[in-house]
Amino acid sequence: MVRKIRIYPDPILREKAEVVEEVGGEILALAEDLADTMIAHEGLGLSANQIGELKRVISVDRSEFSGRESDVQILINPSVVYREGEDVDEEGCLSFPGLYFDVKRSYLVVVKALELQGNKPVPVEITATGLYARVLQHEIDHLNGVLYIDYLKPKERMRKLREWKENLKEELSV
Ligand code: ZN
């Protein structure tokens, strides 16, 4: 089911999501909703916070870098256990429609998580680079209440948010 995406400054985006203790029906339904909502909005990734659930679950659309047509990955309790290098690239976020800017991230990350394979949670250790690593870092940040605007200097952040809000207003009034 496609869910409503929470838009900044919705307070849930600043909350820390809870560790998933048991992968039951509720989490499987959440995983499906995350995938459906991410695909419907053409996002590369989505976190549970963004659809209003404080559980440590994210979805990533790997088709952008794997070359496979349909390649959605669901990760439960993901955490970055190693990082290396630096990479600057433009980033967007479904909770900030239309706001894009450069963010410095680690070029390589190793992420430990439970990956949903079918309906089974399987422990995995993922080594990701480039865009894949970027999406993982962005979505795991969401689970900790951290947003990509936090990487901007305060002045720059205020300016970008002001411009973004004005553009949103214009779009809504058209
Ligand atoms: Zn985001």
Image (cartoon, helix red, strand yellow):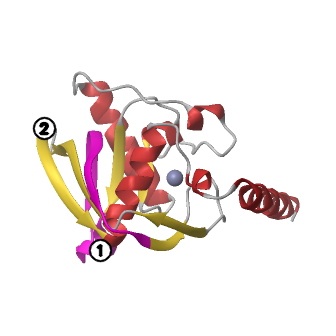
Drawn side of residue 130 relative to residue 50, left or right: left
Number of numbered tags placed on the structure image: 2
Residue 151's tag is none
Q: Residue at x 39, y 30 (%)?
A: 55
Indicate if the residue with disc 1 has its beta carbon within 8 Å of ligand 1.
no
Residue 78 is one of the magenta-drawn residues: yes
Say whether residue 95 is visible.
no
Compared with residue 111, is residue 10 higher up or lower down, i.e. above or below?
A: above
Magenta stretch bounds:
62-87
Tell me where residue 111 appears, x and y as whole percent: 24, 50
Residue 17 is one of the magenta-drawn residues: no
Compared with residue 56, is residue 61 higher up or lower down, i.e. above or below?
A: below
Tell me where residue 145 appears, x and y as whole percent: 52, 37
Residue hosting label 1? 65
Please identify the residue farthest to the bottom as the structure is shown.
67
Residue 8 placement: quadrant: top right
Drawn side of residue 3 relative to residue 45, left or right: right
Compared with residue 20, is residue 5 higher up or lower down, i.e. above or below?
A: below
Q: Amino acid at mark 1?
A: Phe
Q: Amino acid at mark 2?
A: Lys
Q: Identify the secondary structure beneath mark 2.
A: strand
Say whether residue 117 is visible.
yes
Q: Residue at x 22, y 27 (%)?
A: 23
Q: Residue at x 56, y 64 (%)?
A: 92
Residue 120's tag is 2
Q: Identify the secondary structure beneath mark 1.
A: helix
Tell me where residue 19 appears, x and y as whole percent: 32, 26
**Crowd around label 2: few <14 · some 14–19 · many ≥20 (10 Å):** few
Q: Quadrant of the N terminus?
A: top left
